[in-house]
Amino acid sequence: MTKFTSRTGLSRRALLKGAASTAIAAGSTTLGAPMLWAQNIKDVTIRQFGTGVSNLNDVANKVKEDLGFTLEMTALDTDSVTQRAATQPNSFDIADIEYFICKKVWAAGNMQAMDTSKIANYDKIAGTFRSGLLTPTSTIAQGTAPHTVGFTSGQNGTEFIQEESGWMTLIPTIYNADTLGIRPDLIGRPINNWSELLNPEFKGKASILDISSIGIMDMAMVVESMGEYTYPDKGNMTKEEIDLTLGIFTEAKKNGQFRAFWKSFDESVNLMASGEVVIQSMWSPAITAVKSQGVPCVYQPLEEGYRSWGGGLGISAALSGLELEAAYEYINWYLSGWVGGYLMRQGYYSAVPETSKKFMTADEWGFWYEGKAAQGDILSPTGDKLAGTGEVRDGGAFLDRMGSVVCWNSVMDENQYMVRKWNEFIAA
Amino acid sequence: MKKLLENRNVTGWLMVSPLAAVLLVFLVMPIALIVIVSFWRATEFSIIPAFEWDNYAFLFGSPVTYTVFFNTFKYAFITWAFTLIIGFTVAYYLAFHIRSLTWQVALFLLCTIPFWTSNIIRMISWIPFLGRNGIANSTMMSWGVIDEPVEWLLFSDFAVILAFVHLYTLFMVVPIFNTMMRIDKSLIEAARDAGANGAQILWNVIIPLTKPGIMIGTIFVVTLVMGDFITVRFMSGSQSANVGRLISNDIALLQYPSASATAIVLLATVLITIGILLRFVDIRKEL
């Protein structure tokens, strides 16, 4: 569904620009301090949109409390997010998007790069987003790794630069390693491989997500695990490889392997919690949501490794003056730890773990990041119990999980072909 | 000026112009725009004005298109058959078995109660009912009718058609009820006096006179089902597709030209279908 935003923002924006230039003029003459606009920053409204994972009302409330300005949030599904970022640049100020979407929207020129010298915690950002290396010795996984689309040549640059150039396309905020979610109580035996998704044992009880850029990677993991084919590069398939991959899944679909496909986060939660599905592609907080309903659910680590993704905040090309300053202020605040802590307690990783640590208890940090057994009850940010004393996080410590990442969500060279084939798979 | 206004031609044009303007802006222009875009070219992140048949070539060249159009007609036909039988029966009962006007109105309003909530809610409420561990399955299991849950109740064509019938039967009841209420009761008495039995009256008197209502209901149901995408998506668990879903998938993936081409083909198909339907009954005569 297409969502159209009707807005009366034109006059508001014009007004703000006026206010901003007055403030800056006043600032340069009297104090010359960049903080002068703090007087009218309360009138600023920043419009952010993104997927449901990090567009949380708690964040908007905290922004109002800490920074004084209003943050308006819109949560959409992944496809709608791409669509809006690419086609409606005036409908947002901040885009909370995934790195692979960068490849699609950056060329449209709707976004502006950010000056890393204005980002206070830039040095503390995880290596994955800068050099691409998790640890100095790690190898880079296949697919659209964040650092490959993370830098550009200047504020209005449209090409990607493969080194730290000082201009970031997105300021990274969040990432995670994804795997299959299972219902251990309904399966009753250990699951160790991606190939189990197409195991006839789970006929009519499996599901996969209907978002092509992510789904194709899950499929590739399954195909490799089945021993059908080994891709030279999963993140950039040829037409033949796309046909092969979708062919295997179309056959499984026709044999009734899948109960349903899901597109939004809550659909995956309902499928799992109701027992319609016992094994499916899933996202970390969806597991959390199923568990908090008292239903057993495991984010199963698999031998072949994880499929990973990363997200960050980007700024609309239309932003300037006071609002641009407010956006930088907001992003700096975002990296300063409170949001990171909040996201970490949902099972994601913060792109700036060091600052997030300050906003977590030692037990929470040990459980979520270090893979240690919980000392007491582990609660979600909203207060639901997620784990009891002695329990360990699925997959263990940060380095064990992120160290086993074998591919990133991708946009391929043959993306358009893949998308059409994907559409056929859904319709088949 | 006064003379000009008195000219019958001019007043005639002036009187139709508001409606013509509204139709032009809200019907003709959007469709023209869709036609134009359907010839454009799309890359992943941009749409380029062009005139090429690629979108149509891809559409007609893909076997999936034919499956999907077949599916769309299948849904429309089965839904039409069920809504017609149920709708006709309900309308017949209301029009000929309920004697007092008060009760007719009261029962008719009763039929509309489900419409007080949104149709998405009405549709989604079937999901927990039909699910593997849903009310239908657990009830049947406790009665001993089945030993293990019936899988095809949810996320299947059955679920899609059930939801369609539930959503759209009223669109059949209303026009049929309306035409039935206008049938002159003395015609039925005359038929009875001439010796016709109940079945003969139904077949030779009531059905022919109700045809316009049936046709209007049919047009409602067929166009609604053929244009739907959300019911198919939710009730089939994204596993089945009709043309509407093809379009919505294209839009979600930024393939606007391809979506437009599909929309144009769907529009033509629906218009042809309605054209054929109108061959059977002259609804204008009856309105």
Image (tube, rainbow, N blue to C red):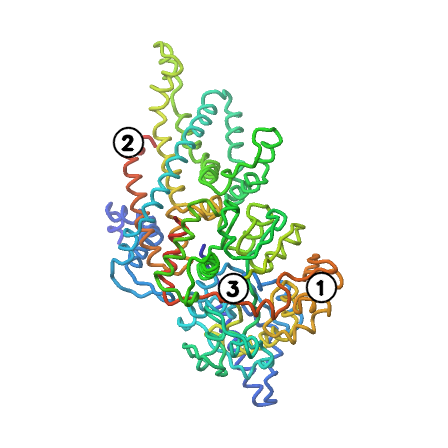
> Which residue ends up furthest to the front in the rendered image?
A227
* Residue receiving disc 3: A307
Instruction: Please indicate whether residue A51 sits to the left or right of residue A368 in the image.
Output: left
Which amino acid does the dot numbered 2 rest on?
Phe
Chain containing the residue with disc 2: B
* Residue receiving disc 1: A373
Task: Check if mark 3's residue and mark 1's residue have beta carbons within 8 Å.
Answer: no
Residue A148 pos. (x, y %): 46, 75
Dot 2 falls on a residue whose secondary structure is: helix
Which amino acid does the dot numbered 1 rest on?
Ala
| Badge nearest the viewer, 2 or 1 | 1
Is residue B76 among the parts visible in the rendering? yes
Residue A250 vertical position relative to residue A114 in the rendered view, above or below: above
Residue A303 pos. (x, y %): 55, 61
Dot 3 falls on a residue whose secondary structure is: strand
Residue A186 vertical position relative to residue A211 in the rendered view, above or below: above
Identify the image quadrant of the C terminus of chain B.
Answer: top left
Q: Do the dots labelled 2 and 1 sit on one chain?
A: no
